[in-house]
Amino acid sequence: MVDVDEVLAMFMRGFERFIGQQGWELRLERFALFQNIYRPGTDETISMVEGRRLFDAFFALERHDIDVAPGAQAALESLAGQANIVILTNAPEAGRAPRMRWLRENGFPYEMLIGSGPKGSLVADMAALIDGPAAFVDDLLPNLDSVAFEAPGVHRFQMVADERLRPMAPTAPERHCRIDDWDELGAAIATRLGL
């Protein structure tokens, strides 16, 4: 089970390009989304309402301008020969079709499920359907902690694809394995799953 944004997709880079076209500026000062969006030339950050509007507008686009995380496609393709891959995303429901199209066009032809909030219960439900080990990859510590609580038997990996965000990302290596390189991560997942 694999998250999309900042795991398979370089979301912040694509969103940065989009908000620039809308007259806003991204300054990566913290591991957050809307608190990093500024009116150019000022210290004024975007309101949560306007930030949410931009977020929803980006996901509603027919084509998402998002780069693939380096190595992600090859790593999942290698794993898919022996494991079932499921994509989990908390993208807005209105973005379902564009997100699925982006995944297919970029070499991720796997089942995709849209959820909201912490992913632990969804991961637990999915893990209960299989006979064997399971793994979960996400960039966000709350999702990893949720899976640890709801599905403690699932192997958890934290991956932050954008190197600009890596130093800012909250992490807990004592609870979740942190690997930010897909070549290394793919091999670690295969080992944990006994592939």
Image (cartoon, rainbow, N blue to C red):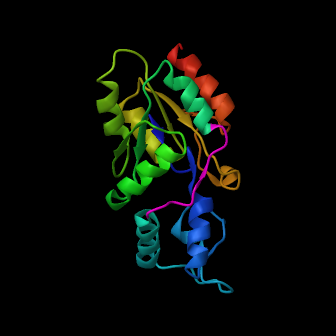
Using the rendered view, name the quadrant where residue 74 is placed.
Answer: top right
Q: Residue at x 34, y 15 (%)?
A: 131
Q: Is residue 154 left or right of residue 94?
A: right
x and y, in percent, of residue 170 in the image: 59, 49
Q: State whether residue 119 appears in this view.
A: yes
Using the rendered view, name the quadrant where residue 44 is placed.
Answer: bottom right
Q: Is residue 183 left or right of residue 128?
A: right
Q: Residue at x 33, y 61 (%)?
A: 94
Name the quarter where the N terminus is drawn.
top left
Name above or below for residue 49 compared with residue 7: below
Residue 146 magenta = no
Q: Residue at x 59, y 61 (%)?
A: 14
Q: State whether residue 173 appears in this view.
A: no
Q: Which residue is the extreme one toward the front? A: 105
Using the rendered view, name the quadrant where residue 27 is placed.
Answer: bottom right
x and y, in percent, of residue 191 in the image: 58, 17
x and y, in percent, of residue 120 in the image: 36, 38
Magenta region = 62-71
Query: How many marks can you see?
Result: 0
